[in-house]
Image: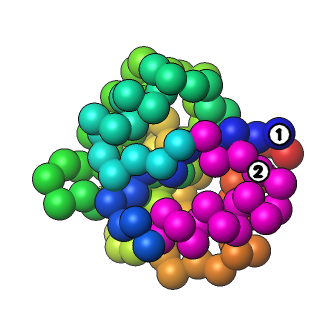
Amino acid sequence: MIKIALVDDSVILRAAIRNVLESSGFEVAFESGGSAEMRAGLKECTVDAVLLDVFFPTENGLDILAELKRHYPHIKVLVVTGLRQDTILAEAQRLGADGVLYKPFDSDELLSSIRHVCGK
């Protein structure tokens, strides 16, 4: 079973994503509203992938991506953003994102992106 961490400041979006993932056989290991909670979660459990939002009120998701890839290079990271800008895509790829998912997305897009990133 693929274990996933959800890192997004929207509690509502995390709940919706959790529902889709768990009803499709994935395990959501933990949820996080930002990097501090993410660090704590990663100390507590092992995950295969992180769904990571780009925009947070007080921090930059691309900085979180860089930290994740520096300390946990084996974890797959799917960056989630509502802003379709080539600069964001290029920077996410440069920092090691394994995929990018654009909001709004439907359940099929979410599941397909997770499976692609995780090689399943």
In the depicted view, which residue is nearer to us: 26 or 109? 26
Q: Which portion, as a residue range, is magenta?
A: 13-29
Q: Residue at the spot x=70%, y=54% of the render?
A: 114
Q: Position of residue 7 (x, y in %)?
A: 43, 50
Check contact, mark 1 vs mark 2: CB within 8 A: yes
Q: Residue at the spot x=32%, y=60% of the render?
A: 9
Q: Main secondary structure of the magenta part?
A: helix
Q: Residues within 10 Å of mark 2 (few under 14, many from 20)?
A: some
Residue 90 seen from this side: no
Q: Residue at the spot x=76%, y=50% of the render?
A: 26
Vertical order, 74 against 1 (above or below): above
Vertical order, 47 against 117 (above or below): above
**Image quadrant where one finds the N terminus:** top right
Residue type indicated by callout 1: Met
At mark 2, the secondary structure is loop
Residue on which the image places disc 2: 26
Residue type indicated by callout 2: Phe
The circle drawn on residue 1 is 1
Between the C-alphas of marks 1 and 2, the distance is 6 Å
Vertical order, 101 against 51 (above or below): below
Q: Position of residue 113 (x, y in %)?
A: 69, 59
23 in magenta: yes
Q: Is residue 76 left or right of residue 43?
A: right
